[in-house]
Amino acid sequence: MSRLKVRNGIRLTSSYIVLIILSIAAIYPALWIILGAVRPGKSLYSKTLFPEEFTLDHFRELFTSNQVMFPQWYMNTLKVSLASMILGVLLTLLTSYALSRFRFSGRQNALSVLLILGMFPGFMSMIAIFLLFKEWGLIDTHLALIMVYAAGAPLGLTLITKGFFDTIPRSLDEAARIDGASNFRIFGSIILPLSRPILTYLALLQFVGPWVDFIFARLILRSKHKWTVAVGMWDMVANSQNTNFTVFAAGAVLISVPITILFIFMQRLLVEGLTSGASKG
């Protein structure tokens, strides 16, 4: 019995040590960026973690500088993220509903294809997508970003959403059909009201993805006034003549604010949607 207690104590202590190390690794870089945003000067390096003086000049510079178009980049990113979220969530819901409720030839093959395609990294198809958009004249447009972000949502989110829909009793569908409801009526009046957790999960993921994406946005967008915040802020520090890392840190803080607020207020629905959707395949 004593050996069991010692073993459990060691296991519990090891778990706490690992959690503490992971917490420090996650919190320290974020804390450094936040403090760097209010540190005077242009360098993030400092002998002390907490600056001796605090300033908000870097935040003001984001909105007053002639070289930094942060408000424009911010609105561009918001537009692309919201449009991608709405279209991506709609496509994912319709695809998941069809795979969950209907039985048709090739259904299992479709699930297998979605699973396999979701394993491949998105950048593998970037050259092909770039050439295709070049032929369509969509290079340097926000529409190109929205199309790719929205169309890619079902690949990674359909299986989780289908698993959530599988937990909704089919007897509700059958009762609605007896009353003469169509499939779209069942989907809109029964399935969606019961799917708030998974809707929250889908909306947050589909919003955050375009909000922080850099690689594809850098490939498609060429005009400075059309950049997203990720591309614009990269340009702020990539130029050898501009090493204002404290302004970069201030922009990073402003970018993280809306995402952090959304996750804090929707954390319960987010976890519920993820765990419910993962209960069935």
Image: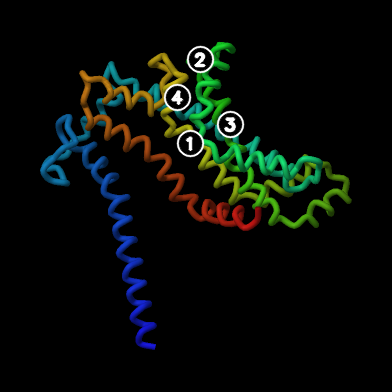
> Badge 1 is on which residue?
209
Where does residue 14 sit, x and y in percent of width and height? 32, 68
Where does residue 218 sit, x and y in percent of width and height? 42, 23
Is disc 3 placed on a helix, strand or loop? helix
Sequence-first disc among 1 and 4: 1
Binning the other alpha carbons within 10 Å of mark 3 as few (below 14), some (14 to 19) or many (20 upward) gives many
Distance between mark 1 and mark 3 Cα atoms:
10 Å
> Badge 2 is on which residue?
139
| Colour mapping | rainbow
Residue 186 sits in quarter: top right
> Badge 4 is on which residue?
217
Residue closer to the observer: 71 or 229:
229
Pointers 2 and 1 in contact (C-beta within 8 Å):
no
Where does residue 223 sit, x and y in percent of width and height? 41, 14
Pointers 2 and 3 in contact (C-beta within 8 Å):
no
Sequence-first disc among 2 and 1: 2
Sequence-first disc among 1 and 3: 3
156 lies above or below 125: below
